[in-house]
Image (cartoon, grey):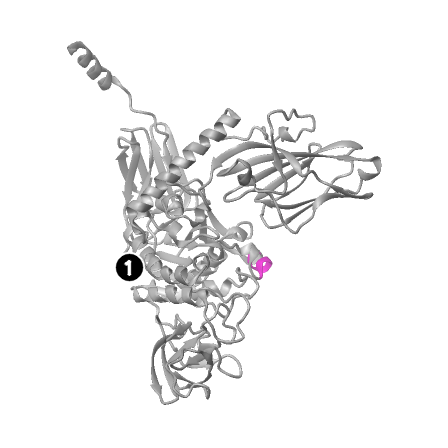
C-alpha cells in the first residue's frame, strides 16, 4: 500500500498541466473601442501556469493563467483617444489588436427593433452612401444561447462605420451613436447584443428571474437532460457527431448528386414541420430529396416554386444550384437554368438550415410546384430526408426562455466596461394583460441587475417605449401594448433612466417601423443629459398630476420645455370616464403648461387616459422641442 501511495504522489507531481488554448476575448480585436477613464480588464485563456504579457503603449501587465486556464489583467484608466496597439503574448504566441481607441461604449440590447439593420430602414441607400466615421464602431454578438453561463463569445468583430459596413449595423444603435459623436466628439462603440422576438426573461440570469431561482435551475437541468438525450438519438441515427454536414464537403453539395444512393434516408411528408415527424428538438442542416418526371416539352423555361421554408435554403436541380434564400416567411421562386432539367426523372435536393424553433418545408399560401412551358408539374408529397449538421434546440424558442440569451450573449461581456445601455424590447412580453403588467417588475429587475453585474450602479439606462402598431381604435378601450408601455415607464422611478417615446413614428401594419433615425435621436437626447450632463429638453411631456374641477380635469406635465403644443388643428388622444369606468373621447385644450380635459357625456369625471391604445393615432400632444407626450392613465390599477 505504501508503494502504491508513493507512486501516486510521484505521478501527480510529474504530471503536466492540461493544455488550454491561448485565447483573448474577441472584444479585444482590431478596431476595439475601450471605455475611457476607467480601469479596463483584459482576459482570456492559456495553459495553467503560463505567463501572459499584456501591453498598451508604455503600460505592461503580467498575469499567470490559473488552474482552469483563465487569466486577466487590468489596464490603467486612459483618456479618450487613439490609435493604440494592444499586444497580448505568451511564450512564442502573440495576439495584437490594432487601431484601438478609448471612448464610450454603449450596450444595445433587446429584440428585433434593436437588431433591425440600417440597410432595412428608412433612407437606407442615402444613409449607407453617406456613412464615413472611423470613430463610430459596432460589434454584433452572434445569436447564440446556452443552458449555463459561458465566458466566451461565439464570434463577432469590431467594424468602423463606412459605406461597406454600416448597412449591417443596428439602425437604432448607429443613429444613437452618430448623434453622440456629433455632441461629444469622443469615439463611440456600440456593443450590440440583441435577438429578434426575444422575451425579457431570456436576458435575465437565474437569480434575477421573478420565479424562485431553484425552480428555474431545476427547469434548466431538465432541459439539459433532454438535450443530451436527443443528441444521443441523433448521433445514433447518423453514427457520428453532428459537428459537420456530410452532405456538403469542401463546398461541394454531394447529397445533391442525382445518382446518390438514398438507402438509409427517412421518408418525410411535405409540407410539414420535421419536429412533428420524429425529429423533435433538431436544429441545423437537413436535406430533402424528391423527384419529378418530365417530358421533352417540359424541360425548358421552368420555374421552381417552393412554398415557405423555415429558415434558409439552398436548392439544387440535378446537382445545379438554382436558388437560395436566407430568410423565413418568403416564397421561394427559382428559375431553372436551361439544361439543368432533362426528359425523364429529375432530382430536386434542398438543403435547409433551421436556426431554432420549428423547421422544414412548411405549409403556407405560396405555391409548391414546378411551372414549365407545358403546364404545372406537382412536386412529391413525400420526400427523402436526412440530417446533416445538427444541434439540439431549446424546448421552445431559446430567445424566449429564461436565462438562455443571458448565458451566452451577456455573461461573456460583463467584464467589459461600458458607459450605459440602450434597450428596445417589450413587444414579445405584451401577449396579454398579465404578461404586460408583469413586465413592470421584470424590467426594473433587469436594469438594476445589469448595473450590478457590470459593477456600474449609476450607468444610464435608456429605453424605447413601444411604437404605435395595429389598427387605430374607433373608440377608447383596453390595450396590452398600452399596459406594456406603462410598465416600461414605471422604470423612470429608478435613477438615471430615460425613455424615448415613439407613438408618433410607428407603422400600423408593420411591427418594425422604418424610421430609426428619430428613435436614435431621442435616445441620444436622453444620453446627452443623463450621461454627459447637458442641460437640454431630453424628454417629451410626462404626466405629473391632475385635479378634478367640476366637469373638467386639469392635467399637469413634466418636461414641457418651452411649452405644450398640439400637432394638428385639434388636440386629441384623450379619453375621460366617470364612476362607471366607461371611457369616451374627450375634448382637450392646452392652457399655459397644462391640459384641460372634459366631455359633455361625463359631467362628473373620475379618470383620464391619454394615448391608451396599441395605435393611439389621435394622440398629438408634444412639447416645443418636437418630442411627443408619453401615454398615461390616472386610473392606474
The residue sitting at the front extreme is 580
Q: Is residue 609 visible?
A: yes
Is 307 or 321 nearer to us in this picture?
A: 307
Tell me the quarter of the image containing the N terminus: top left
Q: Is residue 526 visible?
A: no
Quarter assignment of residue 354 = top right
Q: Residue furthest right?
A: 297
Q: Main secondary structure of the magenta part?
A: helix
Whole-percent x, y for residue 477 in the image: 47, 73
Residue sitting nearer the eye, 564 or 190:
564
Taking depth in this image into account, of 386 and 66 the one nearest to the observer is 386
- Give the percent coordinates (x, y) of residue 162: 52, 52
Q: How many marks?
A: 1
- Residue 464 quadrant: bottom left
User: Label 1 neighbourhood size at 10 Å, few (<14), some (14-19), many (20+)?
Assistant: some
Q: Where's residue 434, x and y in %? A: 39, 61
Q: Is residue 485 left or right of residue 496?
A: right
| Residue 622 belongs to magenta span | no
Q: On the image, which quarter does residue 603 sit in?
A: bottom left
Q: Residue at x 58, y 43 (%)?
A: 312
Front-most of 367 and 506?
367
Furthest-left residue in this view = 2
Pick the quarter of the image with the C terminus: bottom left
Which residues lie in the magenta part?
123-128
Q: Is residue 478 left or right of residue 255?
A: left
Where is mark 1, residue-wise? 458
Above/below status of 107 relative to 230: below
Picture coordinates of residue 321 (x, y %)? 68, 37
Label 1: element kind: loop
Amino acid at each position: 500500500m505504501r508503494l502504491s501511495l508513493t507512486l501516486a504522489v510521484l505521478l501527480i507531481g510529474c504530471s503536466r498541466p492540461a493544455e488550454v488554448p491561448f485565447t483573448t476575448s474577441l472584444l479585444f480585436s482590431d478596431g476595439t473601442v475601450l471605455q475611457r477613464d476607467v480601469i479596463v480588464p483584459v482576459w482570456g485563456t492559456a495553459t495553467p501556469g503560463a505567463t501572459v504579457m499584456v501591453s498598451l503603449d508604455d503600460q505592461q501587465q503580467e498575469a499567470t493563467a490559473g488552474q482552469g486556464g483563465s487569466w486577466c489583467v487590468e489596464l490603467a484608466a486612459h483618456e479618450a483617444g487613439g490609435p493604440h496597439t494592444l499586444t497580448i503574448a505568451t511564450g512564442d504566441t502573440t495576439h495584437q489588436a490594432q487601431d484601438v481607441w478609448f471612448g464610450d461604449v454603449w450596450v444595445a440590447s433587446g429584440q428585433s427593433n434593436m437588431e433591425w439593420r440600417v440597410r432595412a430602414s428608412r433612407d437606407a441607400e442615402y444613409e449607407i452612401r453617406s456613412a464615413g466615421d472611423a470613430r463610430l464602431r459596432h460589434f454584433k454578438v452572434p445569436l447564440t444561447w446556452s443552458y449555463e453561463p459561458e465566458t466566451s463569445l461565439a464570434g463577432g468583430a469590431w467594424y468602423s462605420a463606412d459605406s461597406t459596413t454600416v448597412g449591417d449595423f443596428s439602425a437604432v444603435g448607429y443613429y444613437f451613436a452618430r448623434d453622440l459623436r456629433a455632441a461629444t466628439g469622443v469615439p463611440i462603440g456600440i456593443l450590440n447584443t440583441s435577438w429578434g422576438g426575444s422575451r425579457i426573461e431570456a436576458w435575465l440570469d437565474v437569480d434575477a428571474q421573478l420565479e424562485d431561482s431553484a425552480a428555474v435551475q431545476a427547469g434548466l437541468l431538465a432541459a439539459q437532460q433532454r438535450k443530451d438525450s436527443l443528441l444521443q438519438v441523433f448521433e445514433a441515427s447518423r453514427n457520428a457527431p453532428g459537428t459537420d454536414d456530410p452532405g456538403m464537403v469542401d463546398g461541394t453539395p454531394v447529397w445533391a448528386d442525382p445518382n446518390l444512393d438514398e438507402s438509409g434516408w427517412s421518408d418525410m411528408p411535405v409540407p410539414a414541420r420535421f419536429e412533428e415527424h420524429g425529429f423533435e428538438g433538431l436544429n441545423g442542416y437537413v436535406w430533402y430529396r424528391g423527384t419529378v418526371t418530365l417530358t421533352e416539352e417540359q424541360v425548358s423555361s421552368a420555374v421552381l416554386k417552393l412554398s415557405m421554408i423555415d429558415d434558409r435554403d439552398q436548392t439544387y436541380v440535378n446537382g445545379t444550384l438554382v436558388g437560395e434564400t436566407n430568410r423565413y416567411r418568403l416564397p421561394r421562386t427559382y428559375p431553372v437554368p436551361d439544361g439543368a432539367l432533362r426528359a425523364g426523372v429529375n432530382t430536386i435536393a434542398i438543403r435547409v438550415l433551421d436556426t431554432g424553433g420549428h423547421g422544414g418545408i412548411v405549409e403556407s399560401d405560396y405555391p409548391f410546384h414546378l411551372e414549365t412551358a407545358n403546364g404545372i408539374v406537382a412536386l412529391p408529397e413525400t420526400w427523402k430526408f436526412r440530417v446533416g449538421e445538427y444541434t439540439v434546440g431549446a424546448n421552445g424558442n431559446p430567445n424566449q426562455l429564461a436565462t438562455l440569451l443571458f448565458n451566452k450573449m451577456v455573461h461573456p461581456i460583463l467584464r467589459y466596461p461600458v458607459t450605459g445601455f440602450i434597450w428596445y424590447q417589450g413587444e414579445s412580453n405584451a401577449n396579454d394583460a398579465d404578461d404586460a403588467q408583469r413586465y413592470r417588475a421584470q424590467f426594473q429587475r433587469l436594469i438594476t441587475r445589469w448595473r450590478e453585474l457590470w459593477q456600474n450602479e449609476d450607468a444610464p439606462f435608456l429605453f424605447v417605449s413601444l411604437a404605435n402598431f395595429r389598427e387605430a381604435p374607433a373608440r377608447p378601450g383596453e390595450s396590452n401594448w398600452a399596459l406594456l408601455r406603462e410598465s416600461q415607464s414605471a422604470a423612470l422611478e429608478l435613477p438615471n433612466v430615460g425613455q424615448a417615446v415613439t407613438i408618433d413614428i410607428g407603422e400600423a401594419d408593420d411591427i418594425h417601423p422604418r424610421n430609426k433615425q428619430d428613435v436614435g435621436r431621442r435616445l441620444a437626447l436622453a444620453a446627452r443629459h443623463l450621461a454627459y450632463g447637458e442641460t437640454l429638453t431630453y424628454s417629451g411631456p410626462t404626466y405629473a398630476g391632475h385635479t378634478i374641477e367640476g366637469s373638467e380635469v386639469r392635467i399637469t406635465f413634466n418636461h414641457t420645455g418651452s411649452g405644450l403644443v398640439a400637432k394638428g388643428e385639434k388636440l386629441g388622444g384623450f379619453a375621460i370616464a366617470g364612476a362607471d369606468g366607461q371611457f369616451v373621447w374627450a375634448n382637450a385644450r392646452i392652457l399655459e403648461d397644462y391640459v384641460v380635459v372634459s366631455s359633455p357625456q361625463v359631467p362628473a369625471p373620475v379618470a383620464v387616459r391619454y394615448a391608451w391604445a396599441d395605435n393611439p393615432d389621435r394622440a398629438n400632444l408634444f412639447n416645443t422641442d418636437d418630442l411627443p407626450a408619453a401615454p398615461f392613465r390616472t386610473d392606474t390599477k
